Amino acid sequence: MDIISAALPILLKGLQVTLYIFVIAIILGFLIGLVVALLRLAPIKILNWIAKIYVDAIRGTPFIVQLFFIYFGVNSLHIVSLNSTTAGIITVAINAGAYFAEIIRAGIQSIDKGQTEAARSIGFTASQTMRYVVLPQAFRRMLPTITNQSIISLKDTSLLSVIGIADLTQQGQIQASATFEAFKIWLAVGVIYFIIIYLLTILANFIERRIQLR
Amino acid sequence: MSIITVKNLRKSFGKVEVLKDINAAVKEKEVVCVIGPSGSGKSTFLRCLNRLEEISGGEVVINGHDITDSKININKVRQEVGMVFQQFNLFPHKSVLENITMGPIKILGTEKAEAEKLAIELLGKVGLREKASSYPGELSGGQKQRVAIARALAMNPKIMLFDEPTSALDPEMVGDVLEVMKQLAKEGMTMVVVTHEMGFAREVGDRVIFMDGGYIVEENIPNELFSNPQHERTKAFLSKVL
Ligand SMILES: Nc1ncnc2c1ncn2[C@@H]1O[C@H](COP(=O)(O)OP(=O)(O)OP(=O)(O)O)[C@@H](O)[C@H]1O
Ligand SMILES: [Mg+2]
């Protein structure tokens, strides 16, 4: 128990880094997903293609390769210099963005065409229709899948430890080798991830219930 | 002066021509009913009047606006043309009141309080004042359709288009909706109504248009068209529905 209580403050510092990266990346990822979904559905072929290539490229490659590409690959061009945290945030955001794009596209397409027609017949523009009528309904439907993807992205952040980000996993590694108590430390790390994801699920359920259609 | 003028209107879906040279005019305050067999192009015709369907050819002039002109702001024209759908298409995530106030607030820039006052008035008119805070999911079909009518009226349109507004309703609900439409006609609203309700067409319509195969086959005042149809196809159709 002493081992854990000694390591816990350090693990929690790692957790802070994990959550910091996760929150920023997931918000960015969501915005990317929204934009890409709209491009995917736009009545302009070339935009559809760009969006589709992006989504397919991300879905068709491992997260760790994307991470190395951004951190080592892009940095090796010496055009920009990304520190590990920035590279980590960008990778998680870009990765989640592709999956969010597909979720949001499917959500938008699941809304009955009559909703759009009714809004347009009143005089709403295409973008007002999207904003006031289609997206609010689509988000209600998408919420469970969005939660799912967010949890996957949270877990993906643990891979950022390989580029030296001092996240929860990285701190676990350091503590495990410093204390020679790998079993207890990794169990503790696992429990912390589990609790965070559990809280995330509760939050999502709460929101879902709040916005549920009557 | 006609408030709706349609000249040589054509509409194709891909290679299939669904409307073939439609010519029609509707005068202000006139109630025109459109009847015809399924697939004859009634809905497509109606939906061309507010350009919910892109028009393939010809001319459609609505209250002085040539809506086939690609430079026209169609959203502005649509504010003058209310539409009521067979499937109601209320916004399920908004209360009845919000369904009605949304257009005035977001499009016309009406103050919220004023928009709500108007909405309550309109709800009173369709007999649903007590449902203001309900959600569409809590209403019967007939109630939904009356809310949909109120929602369209909230934009203070010059013209109302109805596409089989009672076809999705249980028979006992039809009367309430038709009653609201009759009242509207009485108040001088210009209306184009696609309908299978021959009784309504006869009683409320100033004119009836019979469509078949993408053409307007025949049009006349209701009594003439129903009791003295000129074309074989009209006779055949009427003998089935009357
Ligand atoms: N979006 C579309 N794409 C392809 N074909 C269509 C489309 N909408 C309608 N059609 C076709 O156009 C023809 C006319 O359809 P429309 O809905 O206007 O008929 P209608 O007279 O309203 O029939 P109903 O009484 O069944 O509502 C039909 O053959 C239909 O299959
Ligand atoms: Mg129809």
Image (cartoon, rainbow, N blue to C red):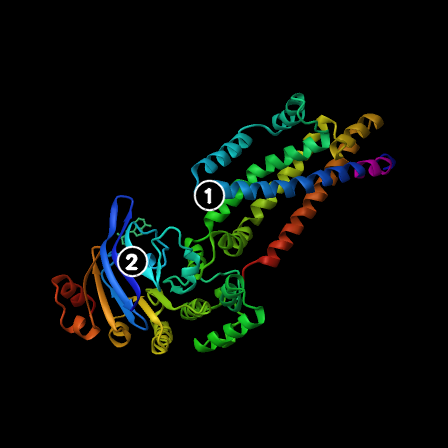
Q: Amino acid at mark 2?
A: Phe
Specify whether residue A7 is painted magenta: yes
Q: Position of residue A45 (x, y in %)?
A: 43, 37
Q: In the figure, B198 relative to A194: above or below?
A: below
Host chain of mark 1: A
Q: Are marks 2 and 1 in contact (CB under 8 Å)?
A: no
Secondary structure under badge 1? loop
Residue occupied by mark 1: A42
Please name whichever residue, B178 or A1, is drawn nearer the observer in this view of the structure: B178
Residue occupied by mark 2: B45
Q: Which residues are magenta?
A: A5-12
Q: Is residue A116 visible?
A: yes
SS majority, magenta = helix
Instruction: Classify residue A148 as left or right of residue B159.
Output: right
Q: Do badges 2 and 1 share one subunit?
A: no
Q: Quadrant of residue B241?
A: bottom left
Marking on residue B209:
none
Q: Position of residue A81 (x, y in %)?
A: 70, 27
Instruction: Classify residue A124 as left or right of residue A181.
Output: left
Secondary structure under badge 2? helix
Instruction: Respond yes or no on whether mark 2 lies under 8 Å from ligand 1.
Output: yes
Q: Give the Cα distance between marks 2 and 1.
A: 26 Å
Disc 1: CA contacts within 10 A as few (<14), some (14-19) or many (>=20): few
Give the quadrant of the C terminus of chain B.
Answer: bottom left
Give the quadrant of the N terminus of chain B.
Answer: bottom left
Q: Position of residue B86 (x, y in %)?
A: 36, 62
Q: Amino acid at mark 1?
A: Ala
Q: In the figure, B10 relative to B198: above or below?
A: above
Q: In the figure, A177 relative to B177: above or below?
A: above
Residue beneath the point at 37% across and 55% down: B52
Q: Residue furthest top?
A: A76
